[in-house]
Image: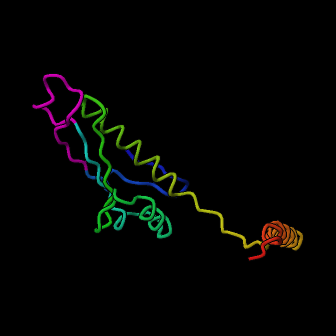
């Protein structure tokens, strides 16, 4: 099933690799027999994503991304492979949708003249208070 991230950005199922492993946690008697946990791997470096989005994914992924550019998502919350597979794909989709949003460029701002004058006036008042404490010292 194709994953639509944003208009014009689509992930094909062939770009994803899944590996099923045994999971700790819920599973009852099957916990030591059936590989229900899924490790979903997405090769960001070789994917069809735009270059600027690849950089944002790499920046946001942190430890979830290997040095080779592979994003790893692990899901072991459910008792069945199908549920864990869907959960992992949903997490990947949410992550990529978040990375698809371009950050707004920062506009440089300046401190107003009034706020500079207020800050300097407050410093002078504080200095006067401190100076008044030492006015009567005759050592």
Q: Position of residue 73 (x, y in %)?
A: 32, 49
Q: Position of residue 91 (x, y in %)?
A: 41, 44
- Quadrant where the N terminus is found in the figure: top left
The residue range painted magenta reads 18-36
Residue drawn at 34 percent across, 59 percent down: 63
Would you say 29 lies left or right of 115 here?
Answer: left
Would you say 45 lies left or right of 81 here?
Answer: right
Residue drawn at 39 percent across, 60 percent down: 62
Q: Position of residue 138 (x, y in %)?
A: 78, 75
Residue drawn at 87 percent across, 70 percent down: 121
Indicate whether 33 appears above or below 54.
above
Quarter of the rendering containing residue 49: bottom left
User: Would you say residue 42 sits in the magenta stretch?
Assistant: no
Quarter of the rendering containing residue 24: top left
Given residues 74 and 89, the one toward you in this image is 74
Quarter of the rendering containing residue 139: bottom right
Would you say 2 lies left or right of 110 here?
Answer: left
User: Would you say residue 32 sits in the magenta stretch?
Assistant: yes
Given residues 117 and 101, the one toward you in this image is 117
């Amino acid at each position: 099933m194709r994953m639509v991230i944003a208009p014009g950005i689509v992930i094909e199922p062939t770009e994803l690799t899944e590996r099923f492993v045994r999971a700790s946690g819920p599973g009852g008697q099957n916990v030591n027999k059936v590989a229900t946990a899924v490790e979903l791997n997405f090769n960001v470096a070789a994917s069809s994503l735009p270059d600027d989005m690849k950089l944002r994914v790499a920046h946001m992924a942190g430890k979830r991304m290997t040095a080779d550019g592979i994003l790893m998502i692990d899901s072991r919350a459910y008792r069945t492979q199908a549920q864990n597979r869907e959960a992992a794909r949903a997490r990947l989709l949410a992550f990529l949708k978040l990375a698809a949003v371009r950050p707004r460029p920062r506009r440089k701002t300046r401190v107003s003249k009034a706020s500079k004058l207020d800050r300097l006036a407050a410093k002078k008042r504080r200095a006067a208070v401190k100076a008044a404490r030492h006015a009567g010292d005759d050592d």
